[in-house]
Amino acid sequence: MSFTYLWQNREIQPIFSYFWLKSWAKRILTFPKLITVLKTNLFLKILGTNITHISIVSNKVRIDGFLNLLTIGEYTFVGQAHIAIHSDIRIGSFVVINDGVKLLTASHNIDDPSWSSFSKPIIIDDYAWIATDAIILPGVHIGKGAVVGAGAVVSKNIPEYGIAVGNPAKLLDKRRIKELNYNPVKLVACYQAWLGK
């Protein structure tokens, strides 16, 4: 994310109006958080992560492994998650990954006497929502618009617009609507202060 983008796309109000004063008050109050977001994204880029300019990754995210194997699309929000990168992790655009989520790309082979390890990629498509404390295991593909419920443990692929809950995660008969057009980063105060609703 770049400050230039926020400046160029800022919500403009008539100067010295009530709404102009209110928007600038919000911008000033949320500026420290904005600086933290910018520093976190810059740090991830320097370490090799492919992250777009307008996504938010919590500065309290825990990332282990090879940051150059992590890709994060546009307008994606990643909360205080744990991301273990031993194989590719590709996170699409407009994705929400809530606090406590674990993305695990490696495990051990329980059928091997030497308990050898293996790694498989995780793919999370656009508009997916991974709710609080969910665990995504190696090799899982979360389809476009899919929802993983809070605390779910996902070991199998979730189809587009599917809703998976429980441990182990099971698909519900109900599916998510297909006409999704929200932007999760605009819900975060330090971005909303600039971009408006």
Image (cartoon, rainbow, N blue to C red):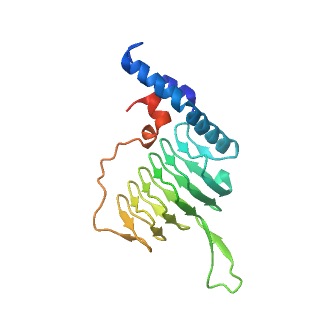
Split into 4 quadrants, where in the image is the N terminus? top right
**Residue 13 place in picture, x, y as percent:** 39, 18
* Side of 181 relative to 62 (left or right): left
Q: Residue at x 47, y 69 (%)?
A: 153
Q: Is residue 1 visible?
A: no
110 versus 68 height, above or below = below
Q: Nearer the viewer, residue 119 or 24?
A: 24
Q: Residue at x 42, y 54 (%)?
A: 128
Q: Residue at x 42, y 71 (%)?
A: 169
**Residue 78 place in picture, x, y as percent:** 52, 49
Split into 4 quadrants, where in the image is the C terminus? top left
* Side of 186 relative to 31 (left or right): left
Quarter occupied by residue 89: bottom right
**Residue 181 place in picture, x, y as percent:** 35, 43
Q: Nearer the viewer, residue 7 or 188?
A: 188
* Side of 148 relative to 43 (left or right): left
Q: Is residue 94 visible?
A: yes
**Residue 64 place in picture, x, y as percent:** 67, 58
* Side of 159 relative to 48 (left or right): left
Q: Could you tell me how many numbered marks the image carries?
A: 0
Q: Residue at x 44, y 33 (%)?
A: 192
Q: Nearer the viewer, residue 121 or 41?
A: 41
